[in-house]
């Protein structure tokens, strides 16, 4: 790595419970020694992700945006499109980092809708940088660092919601219906929107069609 760049990634997009978290992180040559061992968050255990996130936060300029379920559901109802919501969050996190640490290059994972969606949302600072959107961008250290920050924050917030609701909210979107039904049975139907993404088909199944 000859010069620094900003990487951006998200966590929680495919999880029924918990927030959508978007993180941007600047990594320069001066950070590499301390970030040894940092790799795509999908290859780390939860405890490793949490531990590495603490190191990254201490070392690198970063921004983490957590959109909790209540706000997420509100925004999704307004925007009606996950890609647009993601693009807005990516652009905001990138701008936050660029305000404290200028960079000529921004790297993002390939969006379903393409990187231009994020690029169009960028403000003045972001537009001055080269925006690269590519498949498996987590191979880049800056994107890997951002992916860890996003995953760690998702895990923390999911645990926080679990404590608030009084039961363990599982990750993912496959084995979540029994927990969803338990949330509704214990706290009522409206409680589901405080902990889950309501546009998932799962929400209809939980609420009985």
Image (tube, grey):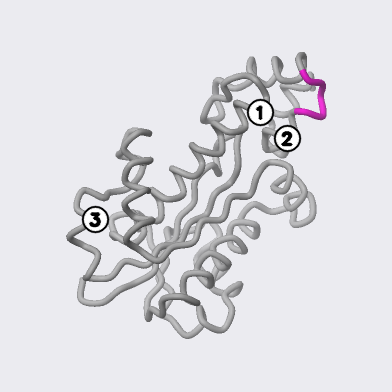
Q: Nearer the viewer, residue 153 or 79?
A: 153
On the rendered structure, is 130 left or right of 94? Answer: left
Instruction: Check if mark 2's residue and mark 1's residue have beta carbons within 8 Å.
Output: yes
Q: Which residue is mark 3?
A: 35
**Prevailing secondary structure class for the magenta stretch in the rendered image:** helix
Give the spatial CA distance, label 3 vs label 2.
Answer: 36 Å
Instruction: Report the mark closest to the observer, 3 or 1.
Output: 1
- The residue depicted at 21 percent of the width and 62 percent of the height is 32
User: As drawn, which residue projects farthest toward the front?
Assistant: 58
On the rendered structure, is 185 left or right of 131? Answer: right
> Which element carries disc 1, helix, strand or loop?
helix
Across and down, in percent, residue 112 comes to 52, 55
Q: Which residue is mark 2?
A: 194
Q: What's the magenta region?
A: 187-191
- Crowd tier of the residue under label 1, counting other residues whose Cα lies within 10 Å: few below 14, some 14–19, many 20 or above: few
Instruction: Report the mark closest to the observer, 2 or 1.
Output: 1
């Amino acid at each position: 790595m000859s010069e620094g760049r900003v990487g951006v990634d998200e966590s929680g997009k495919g999880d029924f419970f918990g927030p959508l978290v978007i993180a941007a992180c600047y990594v320069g040559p001066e950070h590499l020694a301390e970030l040894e061992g940092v790799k795509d968050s999908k290859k780390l255990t939860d405890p490793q992700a949490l531990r590495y996130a603490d190191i990254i936060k201490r070392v690198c300029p970063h921004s983490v945006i957590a959109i909790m379920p209540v706000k997420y559901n509100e925004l999704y109802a307004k925007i009606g499109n996950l890609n647009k919501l993601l693009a807005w969050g990516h652009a905001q996190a990138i701008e936050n980092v660029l305000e404290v640490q200028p960079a000529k290059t921004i790297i993002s994972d390939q969006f379903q809708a393409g990187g231009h969606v994020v690029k169009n949302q960028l403000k003045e600072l972001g537009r001055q940088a080269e925006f690269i959107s590519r498949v498996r961008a987590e191979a880049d250290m800056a994107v890997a660092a951002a992916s860890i920050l996003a995953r760690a924050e998702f895990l923390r917030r999911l645990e926080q919601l679990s404590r608030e609701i009084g039961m363990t909210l599982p990750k993912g979107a496959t084995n979540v219906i029994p927990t969803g039904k338990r949330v509704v049975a214990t706290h009522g139907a409206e409680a589901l929107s405080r902990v889950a993404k309501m546009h998932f088909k799962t929400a209809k199944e939980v609420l009985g069609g």
